[in-house]
Amino acid sequence: MERRVAYRISVDSGGTFTDGVLIDEQGVAVMRKAHTTPHDPTQGTLECLRKLAQACELTLAELLGRTESLVLGTTMATNVVATHSGPRMGTIATRGYRLRMAFPQVAKADWKEGPVDMYDFHADPPRLLTPLHLMTEVTERVDCTGAVITPLDENDVRRAVRELRDQGVTTIAVTLMHSPVNPAHERRIGQIIAEEAPAMCVALSSTVLPVSGEVERWSTTMFAAYVAPVVTAFVTRIGTLLAEAGFGGQLLFIQSNGGIATPEIVKENPAVLLLSGPAAGPSLGLALGLDHEHRNVLSVDMGGTSFDVGVVHDGAVDTVREQIIDGKKFALPSVDVTAIGAGGGSIAYVDASGRLCVGPRSASAAPGPACYGKGGTEPTVTDANVVLGYIDPEFFLGGETRLRKDLAEQAIAEKIAKPLGLTVLEAAAAIYEVINTTMASGTDVAFARRGYDPRDFALCAAGGAAAVHAVRIMQELRIRKLIVPKVAPIYCAFGMMYCDLKHDWQRAFHAATAQVDFAALQAAYDEMEAQARETLRREGVAEADIVIQRSMDMRYWGQFRDRNAPLPGGAVNADALAAATAAFHQVHKATVGHSDPAYPTEIVRLHLSGSARMRKPVLRDIAAGRGAEQARKGTRMAHFAGAGLVNTPVYDGNRLGRDDSVAGPAIIEETFTTFVLPPGVATRVDRYGNFVTTVLEARA
């Protein structure tokens, strides 16, 4: 009897393309792309699965019947917030605080992406998630100790719920003062909503984010309520469609924190998918770095509209407790990814002062760069790469799409070359240099904020556009090693294969370190740990496989710059707290620039994560190379700084084998990406087909 091959699949639904990767038991990987369907993301996901099935010469039902696990990632929740296309949402706040979330939450510099004039008093503040008339308030009040100052007026609550229901509201965020220390009023409001409007989605701030700090907690709760109906519907629908199509394996979703979760857990807090899109990339960067003996990895993913920067430090993916989304605070743990407005579709223009600028405005997928021939007239980074000879117009997406070099030249000539008095080639080269500098400087700033030096890191460059620019970024940052993954065009989809089950908990806890109540501190961590173990057991994890990690946010007494410090396992006692305090001083020194171990400190928040390792894919080694010459496709003219136009060798990346080497100037083409090697740079193919590059002549 023929043995049935078992598959593991991951699918990442992005803004333009849905990427899929399949790995069989022999470690053979198959990659496919499909167009994303924003109106119904399930259709783009199923189409990608059909393409994977066709590649394996199977029907969709046969493929899904042999699939043991399927991990899904999606930017759906992010797009719902960005486009304000979510459901009609209402809020219920403590009386007197109805309009608190109508005020800007962040500095003007964070209102939107790109340069902001701090003195522009006509700038529009971030758009609210819900109109003012749907922000309601009820009579109640709890103080900071949890004592009830004003009892909850249940008739007032029923009035507010009925008003919102009658105005077509389908989801409600409940945001009361000091609810983390006494959640009774919020819980009762949740019960009343269930009585008055059983179909209503509800998010309680004391459940979503039980910590002090009203703005962060309320804003995160509003995000949770806003995306809940859409995320829950998607998770339910895709699960049903997959089951009907023959899938009987384990369905998982990638979360904002870089971990994966089962559908049941996601439905309980849909906000965990809000930053799902780029969260998995750094996990693959970590795996690649470790394979090349690097525990510090700079993970970058360059697509059509953005350049996402993630960091792996000392063998762990960096996460943060707060991100700014659409000018609002989102305070659930998420992978620390900095998005820079630089991508293949970034538009180049000459500003009023005669300066060449590139991005953050993008041509997006429609109309796209001028060379797409879809009506776009603005010059973009992709247009410049075509003019410079880096991208072959006849081999874009493996020849599936033909580009119009003449339209790229026309757009650059009219909008850049003519105003600046340059030739078209000079203008294209200037666009290329500006976007490289923008990405490198943005990355450098991101590193400085984290307290790291980029020279201590390897660079892992992924995304369809990154390999064209990777070497120049590497040189700008003085990084010595560059890894371009074989799976660069489906980086995040492949990265999902390397993610573990992971969930996070937070608690408010404010105390002077020298006067802490260890019993109360231990009880808070015990409560979170019990919840973590219960959640992971529900996901099928054995008790022995559960990993618990604890940490706390600390700050110097009277200051506001808090930093996270790990807390050792075992009993929470004086020795454990001393170790956490020492770690806080070190982190404060690295990120702020100074520390004072003699100065008193205080604890402001507790964190705990529960995780369980998932089996990682074991890839098959590619065949040994027979020399780069056998993979040579020909030559074409390409422009390089300092050398001008050069007749450059072009190689077929799929025909390069293990240990084959290519020295620049050269261009390596694959179906979905192009790797540009300037003079003075050499790359080698590793055992999995990744390109490992070292700089022979670094910039001074």
Image (tube, rainbow, N blue to C red):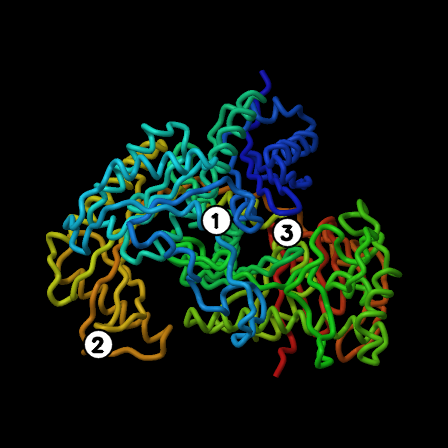
What's the CA distance linking mark 2 and mark 1? 48 Å
Residue 589, x across and y down, in percent: 33, 76
- Which residue does the image show at 49% across and 29% down from the upper left? 236
Q: Mark 3 points at which residue?
A: 486
**Residue neighbourhood size for the residue with mark 1, other residues' Cα within 10 Å, grouped as few (<14), some (14–19), many (≥20):** few
- Which residue does the image show at 39% across and 37% down from the upper left? 163
Residue 61, x across and y down, in percent: 61, 22
Three-letter code, disc 1: Pro
**Would you place residue 496 above or below residue 375 in this image?**
above
Label whose residue precedes the other's in the sequence (2 or 3): 3
Q: Tell which of 498 and 175 is nearer to you.
A: 175
Q: Name the residue under label 2.
A: 597
Q: Residue 599 carries which label?
A: none
Which image quarter: residue 413?
bottom right
Is residue 336 visible in the rendered structure shown here? no
Quadrant of the drawing holding the C terminus = bottom right
Q: Mark 1 points at which residue?
A: 131
Q: Tell which of 591 and 483 is nearer to you.
A: 591
Disc number lying in front (3 or 1): 1
Say if mark 2 contacts mark 1, CB within 8 Å.
Answer: no
What's the CA distance linking mark 3 and mark 1? 47 Å
Label whose residue precedes the other's in the sequence (2 or 1): 1
Label whose residue precedes the other's in the sequence (3 or 1): 1
